[in-house]
Image (cartoon, grey):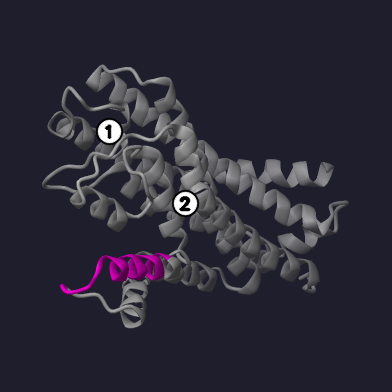
Amino acid sequence: MTGLLEVFRKEISDNFNSKRFIILFLLVYIAGIASIYIAAQNIRSSVDENTRYIFLNLFIVSGKDLPFSFPLFMSIFIPIIGIALGFDAVNSERTSGNLSRLLAQPIYRDDVIHGKFLAGLVVIAIMVISIVALVAGLGLRMIGVPPEAEEVLRVFAFIFVSILYGAFWLSLAILFSVLFKKTATSALTSIAIWIFFFLFMSLIAGLVANAIVPVNESSTFEDVVKFDTVYRMINRINPGTLYSESIQALLLPVMGSSSPTMMMIGIYSGLKPTPLPIAQSLLIVWPQLVGLLALTALCFIIGYVKFMREEIRST
């Protein structure tokens, strides 16, 4: 336990004192302030006297000319932060020879990887909590509408899901840091996977789903439902999809489903959407949370086993 705490303190200190962290921190804050400014400028046109959860609209409203919302900002920057904190966690120490000197001390090998992961996770948590607090504080001052108790709970749930999403990308980056000897290789591989998930996974899922269940103008309601089921089942391999579905259900209580397609079908069918209580929203996002946790655990376990079995020689 002592070795774990020592590695944890060292990694926390290195992260907070590095130029990379300062640059990421500034970029995150600038983008967060920009998103809340856009939301505050357009929130009047998106709410009326019958609108509930006005405070939550700060996190979902985007501009007409610039469709940049806070969830979109978080879905882009959280993977970057996780990758930046983990892509050189092990291989840089191995290349410089610090890893062999570190393991020569009375520190267990598993304490090293555990301490690095926990330190990165704490940094991600600090950044997420601080940017959400900044957005909430500025938004509250700009719109002057205090949040309800349920809105506060939903924001806390949103913070938890965002930290879990960051934990996945951190564990993935640490995995590649263990697998590859060069930091550039691990960084490029992590970024390539992020780009694949962000840009191409939905396209591939749509093509596969359309090949299994073709949908056109003459398709029946059952065909549309089957297509949406197959599409979402394939697309949920993407952790970004799990994250977006989770925050959609949490920050948009009026949606009775995490599927936009099913929501639009309900609207066109004449069903009036009603806000769900937070307990129902949490039940909806529970499978997504389990999926994110499973993917995070899988990446970390593979990296952990590989790190524990590899031979580390002094240089």
Left/right of residue 232 with respect to residue 9 in the rendered view: left
- The residue that disc 2 covers is 81
Question: Mark 1: which secondary structure?
Answer: helix
Residue 50 lies, with reference to residue 235, above or below; the image says: above
Could you tell me which residue is drawn at 65 percent across and 52 percent down? 117
Residue shown at 42% from the left, 42% from the top: 25
What secondary structure is the magenta-colored segment mainly?
A: helix
Across and down, in percent, residue 50 comes to 20, 25
Residue 44 locus on image (x, y percent): 15, 28
Q: Position of residue 124 (x, y in %)?
A: 52, 44
> On the rendered structure, is 37 left or right of 122?
left
- Residue that carries the numbered disc 1 in the rendered image: 57
Dot 1, crowdedness within 10 Å: few (<14), some or many (≥20)? many
Q: Residue at x 34, y 31 (%)?
A: 135
Looking at this view, is 181 or 57 the one in front? Answer: 57
Image marks 2 and 1: residues in contact by CB distance under 8 Å: no
- Residue 179: horizontal and vertical position, in percent? 64, 73
Residue range corresponding to the magenta coloring: 217-232
Q: Nearer the viewer, residue 94 or 1?
A: 1
Query: Is residue 194 depicted above or below 265 in this figure?
Result: below
- Label 2: state its secondary structure: helix
Write the residue at 36% across / 38% down.
251
Mark with earlier residue (2, 1): 1
